[in-house]
Amino acid sequence: DIYTCNYENLPWLLEKCGNHWPFDMVVSDESTKLKGFRGSEQVSTKGKVFTRAGGGQRTTALARVAHSRVKRFIELTGTPAPNGLLGLWGQTWFVDAGERLGRSFTAYKDRWFTTIQEAGHWDKNPDYKVPIIKPASWAQEEIETLLRDVTVSLNPKDYFDLRDPIVNVI
């Protein structure tokens, strides 16, 4: 059986299923919606390592079952990093629990990114500062190499006879 559910209903679905999660595989279409997940590794008082979920409601709900009850997690997207490499960690965590890009978002960010400077938003508050985070020069290549074994990339030009677009500037 195949069931579909939109991202907005994930918290409801988790609540409804409770401890009886019946799905052994999840296929996440438009997986960039998972990029906001922010997990961090925690150690319980008994010494057991677990991931504390953070981020949006939907990703936090899905994270509760992603590696404890789901045997296979497949992600589909046309643009895995539309706004840059920083958004890849949350998506990748659902595939491998942080095995390739780090167990936490902070570990990922510290390894492949640098904070260049802080920019103020003068129109809102001159004292408010926002860090500008840029990928290191080697980040793109290293991240692609690490994800190669769990990623399939298709180029339409490999399957279809596509001509270059005709640009007509008027």
Image (cartoon, helix red, strand yellow):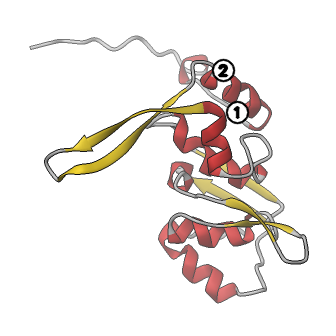
Residue at point 28% right, 11% down?
Answer: 166
Tell me residue 114's x, y (percent): 53, 32
Q: Is residue 4 left or right of residue 22?
A: left
In front here: 162 or 123?
A: 123
Of pointers 2 and 1, the one earlier in the residue sequence: 2
Can you see residue 91?
no
Task: Quickly name the residue at label 1.
Answer: 152
Task: Quickly name the residue at label 2.
Answer: 141
In front here: 71 or 84?
A: 84
> Circle 1 — which element?
loop
Residue 129 drawn above or below residue 20: above
Tell me residue 147's x, y (percent): 73, 34
Name the image quarter holding residue 109: top right
Residue at point 58% right, 65% down?
Answer: 54
Callout 1: few (<14), some (14-19), or many (20+) C-alpha neighbours within 10 Å? few
Residue 8 badge: none
Specify the amino acid type for callout 2.
Answer: Glu
Name the image quarter holding residue 100: top right
Can you see residue 88?
yes
Specify the amino acid type for callout 1.
Answer: Val
Callout 2: few (<14), some (14-19), or many (20+) C-alpha neighbours within 10 Å? few
Tell me residue 158's x, y (percent): 61, 18
Residue 168 drawn above or below residue 124: above
Distance of mark 2 from mark 1, alpha carbons?
A: 16 Å
Residue at point 35% right, 45% down?
Answer: 130
Q: Is residue 111 left or right of residue 48?
A: left
Residue at point 78% right, 78% down?
Answer: 22
Q: How many marks?
A: 2
